[in-house]
Image (spheres, rainbow, N blue to C red):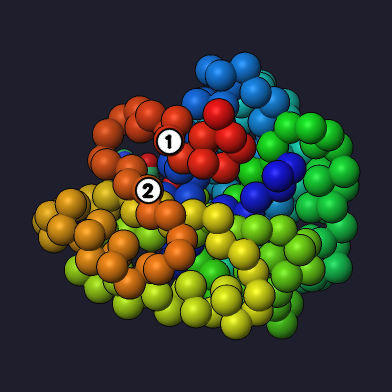
């Protein structure tokens, strides 16, 4: 399984957190792993950006930012809107080609492509994340929150992916910040409806051990 697309029910749910945890776990196991975040919005400084967090998890220097995230925009908006604010545009074909170049380089390792926003967030002019996932013909992992309302958001995202025949390798419930339903109860409720797809839980902790997810995705 050389490439996985990391998508989510929405933005700020935990895609980068889960991707970085997976990278760290795989690296600790001595496995080859790389990451790609093709477009980055709200990029005003390197520190704290998704590119910085992913490069840090990979043990790579800041000079890798162009390779990690070639399309960077200052406005904290979906890429097509953020690009428009700079008089630019984001072409779906260009995004597809950028991803495919990285997919061609990964060899036997695992490439994690972090999406932008949620399953149906605009990603390029006239295209949402799901269109890119379909173009790339890769399986997805879906990151969801544990907030009240997450079950409906998660099931809606799953139905959208299934309608486009995107295989979903795992659902990861990343514990939401703040006052939320009990994590165990939320995961139970999620697993009851998310049939046929393994559900993993990422509790709110600085360093989540993603070995169970890693083993499921790439084998023991
Ligand atoms: N399970 C978790 N444990 C601890 N912090 C988390 C967890 N999930 C998300 N976060 C934090 O919540 C914020 C948003 O998560 P992030 O991974 O950046 O979301 P996304 O990439 O989907 O936009 C970040 O500060 C991140 O570190
Ligand atoms: Mg992110």
Residue 185 in the image: above or below residue 154 = above
The structure residue drawn at horizontal position 78% and vertical position 62%, both measured from the top left corner, is 136
Question: Residue 206 falls in which quadrant of the image?
Answer: top left
Pick the residue in front: 77 or 186. Answer: 186
Q: Name the element at disc 2.
A: strand
Pick the residue in front: 44 or 3. Answer: 3
Q: CA distance from mark 1 to mark 2?
A: 8 Å
Position of the N terminus by quadrant: top right
Question: Is disc 2 surrounded by few (<14), some (14 to 19) or many (20+) residues within 10 Å?
Answer: some
For the question of whether residue 45 can be seen, the reply is no
The structure residue drawn at horizontal position 26% and vertical position 40%, both measured from the top left corner, is 204
Q: Name the element at disc 1.
A: helix
Are discs 1 and 2 less than 8 Å apart at CB? Answer: yes
Q: Position of residue 90 (x, y in %)?
A: 76, 68
The structure residue drawn at horizontal position 66% and vertical position 75%, both measured from the top left corner, is 165
Q: Is mark 1 within 8 Å of ligand 1?
A: no
Position of the C terminus by quadrant: top right
Question: Residue 148 falls in which quadrant of the image?
Answer: bottom left
Residue carrying label 2? 200
For the question of whether residue 171 can be seen, the reply is yes
The mark found on residue 1 in the picture is: none
Question: Residue 81 falls in which quadrant of the image?
Answer: bottom right
Residue 20 placement, left or right of 82: left
Q: Position of residue 123 (x, y in %)?
A: 65, 69
Considering only order in the chain, which callout, 2 or 1, is on the residue closer to the N terminus? 2
Residue carrying label 1? 212
Q: Position of residue 122 (x, y in %)?
A: 61, 74
């Amino acid at each position: 399984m050389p490439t996985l697309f990391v998508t989510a029910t929405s933005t700020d749910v935990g895609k980068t957190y889960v991707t970085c945890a997976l990278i760290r776990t795989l690296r600790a196991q001595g496995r080859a792993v790389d990451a790609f975040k093709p477009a980055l919005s709200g990029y005003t400084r390197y520190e704290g950006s998704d590119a910085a967090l992913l490069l840090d998890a990979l043990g790579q220097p800041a000079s890798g930012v162009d390779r990690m995230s070639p399309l960077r925009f200052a406005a904290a908006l979906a890429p097509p809107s953020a690009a428009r604010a700079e008089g630019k545009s984001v072409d779906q074909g260009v995004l597809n080609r950028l991803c495919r170049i990285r997919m061609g380089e990964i060899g036997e390792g695992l490439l994690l492509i972090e999406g932008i926003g949620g399953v149906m967030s605009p990603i390029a002019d006239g295209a949402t994340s799901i269109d890119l996932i379909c173009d790339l013909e890769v399986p997805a992992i879906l990151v969801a929150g544990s907030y009240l309302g997450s079950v409906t958001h998660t099931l809606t995202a799953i139905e959208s992916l299934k309608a486009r025949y995107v295989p979903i390798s795992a659902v990861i419930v990343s514990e939401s910040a703040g006052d939320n339903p009990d994590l165990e109860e939320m995961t139970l409720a999620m697993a009851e409806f998310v049939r046929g797809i393994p559900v993993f839980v990422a509790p709110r902790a600085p360093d989540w051990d993603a070995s169970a997810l890693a083993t499921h995705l790439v084998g023991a």
